[in-house]
Amino acid sequence: MEEKIIGSMNGAGIYGVISICIFVAFFTGMLVWAFTKKAAYLDKMGRLPLDSGEKDSNEKPQA
Amino acid sequence: MNIETFKYDNRIVRAFAIATVVWGIVGMLVGLLAAVELFFPGANLNFQFITFGRIRPLHTNAVIFAFVGNGMFMGIYYSLQRLCKARMFSDFLSWFNFWGWQLIIVSAALTLPLGFTTSKEYAELEWPIKVAIAIVWIAFSVNLFGTIVKRREKHMYVAIWFFISTAVTITVLHVVNSMTMPAGLFKSYSMYAGVQDALVQWWYGHNAVAFFLTTPYLGLMYYFLPKAAGRPIFSYRLSIIHFWALVFLYIWAGPHHLLYTALPDWAQSLGMVFSLMLIAPSWGGMLNGLLTLRGAWDKVRQDPVLKFMVAAVTAYGMATLEGPLMSIKTVNSLSHYTDWTIAHVHGGGLGWNGFLTFSMLYYLFPRLYKTQLWSTKLANYHFWLGMLGIIFYVVPIYVAGITEGLMWKQFNKDSFLQYPNFLESIVQVVPMFRLRSIGGTLYLLGTLLMAYNLYRTAKAGRFEPDTEAQAPALEKTAEAPHGKYSFHRLLEGKPMFFTVLAILAILVGGMIEIIPMFLIQANVPTIASVKPYTPLEVLGRDLYIREGCLGCHSQMIRPFRSETERYGDYSKAGEYVYDHPFLWGSERKGPDLAREGGRYPDAWHFNHMDDPRATSPGSIMPRYSWLLTQKLDRESLPARLAALRRVGVPYPAGFENGPAQKDLDAQAAKVVANLKSGSVTCDPDKEIVALIAYLQRLGTDIKSAPVTTAAN
């Protein structure tokens, strides 16, 4: 029985290693991607919600 | 450039807005009633349909799925159209979404008080309603993706990413956690048992918080905060990191709800570590929101919309700092099962979801009705009532939670439990429960003020069903030339590719946690003496589920001396292999019941259920006198046993057609005889007999025989 439990612990250890590998790979990729974005693009994207294309603007409540 | 003119659909936004306000008030009222019942157990007037155990899930479902759910749809239907510069993909699907969702809410409001529940937290609704939820959710998702596909804006703003992750993740969570075997129209048994059921449930439960209460609302924050402040978000780059880090990390954190339980240790540690890491993206998002207002804080003083938003984002920051801290195993050993958790969720719920919903409502009504808010002063009163409400709610409940945790663990100088009677800890915190209900009342009063203010605003203005807008058509030639910018264009230009990546990000964590739980048998070592429940016990267990007993009683003794001294040997994974569903509970307003069997005579349970204060003076448990008079539903037994066999409980073939009934009669007669020896007369066909049989069984498999863990 002890061997079974120890065996399962060893098996479980692999999941920790797999998790950390996936984690590091994911975050490295994401950070590289985010930090290679051009400032002009980021600026444009940030302003996107401010223009909703409404003709007779009800962006602001009427006085 | 081909400029197109089109119309945004405001009717659907208004419908969801009204539903948000109405269900919000209903959900808060139910919460208030539940809060009052905790210090005044007679507040249900001995009416079974509004007992604490039944209305607690009604309250949680109402505020999560009815109040926040409608608020989420309201915000998405408004912002998505404007971010995509397109009307919703299909008006039919919009209204199908609206009416379907309201129908689901009404079904929940009817079935939960009637006791039709699966008992799995935030997933209590029975299988026909679960099917309806799936259909309506798919309708919403199709409408969402359809609108994104026909958009006129080339880029997908980060809010849309949050909406997409919400749509796909909730689908996955709902389907996996809803795997049940029906045993009639309003009864089903979870496909999973014990530890596995617990892991799947809290993988779901935690991520329901993450992907229903958090990601859609973050998307809405990224839209409405810049709109209300009139300036872009502080850092779009940070929002990208916020999104990917959050959706990737969140899904791993579920096991922090099961620390120190019978869940394998590796899964607990994984849950704890990823929960701690969540602080980073959460605080990144909070700071991104708050820093958007740098240099514009004067606006916060004047504009109630911004006022509510700032408080909401701050509450988000507080809750997402506290959550990871509570996931640290040592902190959790004190906080788990106590009211600390209740304070935590209400800080997040009332502060983050509640206040952000209020800010959106104050933003939308004047715009939908082309007028100004009827009274800024009243909105300010609402703000302060809400703030005071939150403080009066959470502070007493934090005190209560920490008091409970400390009292449960306290030993005296002779190394005995200082407070061996669980009731002592509850009596101590009852004054806090009273204070908490004052907090809840203030918050509700604020909401009522808002409802009146919005009503007057609507009356003063003129509703605009459609808003005309113009935008250039999206040119197909915008696709990138081969190679250049291809990944970026692919990601943003192709919503489906983006969705696949998002699904991968959320699936990986769930798979790594859940698949080994099912594949490595050693994760649940079986115990030879653990046997399936008898027919009478099955019916008793179903009554335990119907009455929502697990709202106050856990069935999971953690491996602490303070718990084993009080309740007996700590719980083992192998004890739960026939528990469909698991009933570990998450909160203790009463003692743990995992080893309740044989602790008291049958007659004690009978008297206790009739009037808990007769046997336990000062108890806050409601009376369950209807169990003494209602007849046990024996007709459904064959269907129940057959369903349990189908999910893996080894009842012999044909057991339900005859042998089970005989077994039931024999055991019921035994209970009745035991009751008689305790001077209690009771017919064998009453519900109380089954419940007593079940309670007397709890934990006895291990008590009666030495624990031998089978080699498997």
Image: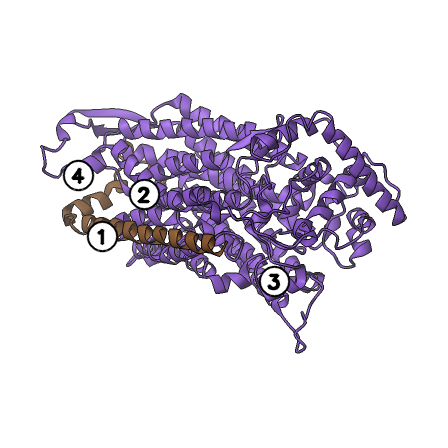
Could you tell me if the residues under marks 3 and 2 are in contact, i.e. CB atoms within 8 Å?
no
Say which residue label 1 marks. Answer: A28
Say which residue label 4 marks. Answer: B487
Which of pointers 3 and 2 lies earlier in the amino acid sequence?
Answer: 3
**Residue kind at label 3, given as amino acid type:** Ala
Q: Classify residue B194 by image quadrant.
A: top right
Could you tell me which residue is drawn at 34 percent across and 46 percent down? Answer: B247
- Label 4: chain letter: B
Do marks 4 and 3 share a subunit?
Answer: yes
Does residue B582 appear to the left or right of B164 in the view shown? right
Give the camera-side residue of B9 and B553.
B553
The answer, for residue B9, to whether it is visible in the render is no
Could you tell me which residue is drawn at 26 percent across and 36 percent down? Answer: B498
Distance Cα–Cα, label 3 vs label 1: 43 Å
Say which residue label 3 marks. Answer: B400
- Label 1: chain letter: A
The answer, for residue B693, to whether it is visible in the render is yes
Q: Is residue B396 above or below residue B670?
A: below
How crowded is the residue under tag 4: few (<14 C-alpha within 10 Å), some, or many (20+)?
A: few
Distance Cα–Cα, label 4 vs label 2: 17 Å
Distance Cα–Cα, label 4 vs label 3: 53 Å
Q: Classify residue B8 by image quadrant.
A: top left
Could you tell me if the residues under marks 4 and 2 are in contact, i.e. CB atoms within 8 Å?
no
Q: Could you say whether the residue bearing mark 1 is in a helix, strand or loop?
A: helix
- Label 2: chain letter: B
How crowded is the residue under tag 1: few (<14 C-alpha within 10 Å), some, or many (20+)?
A: few
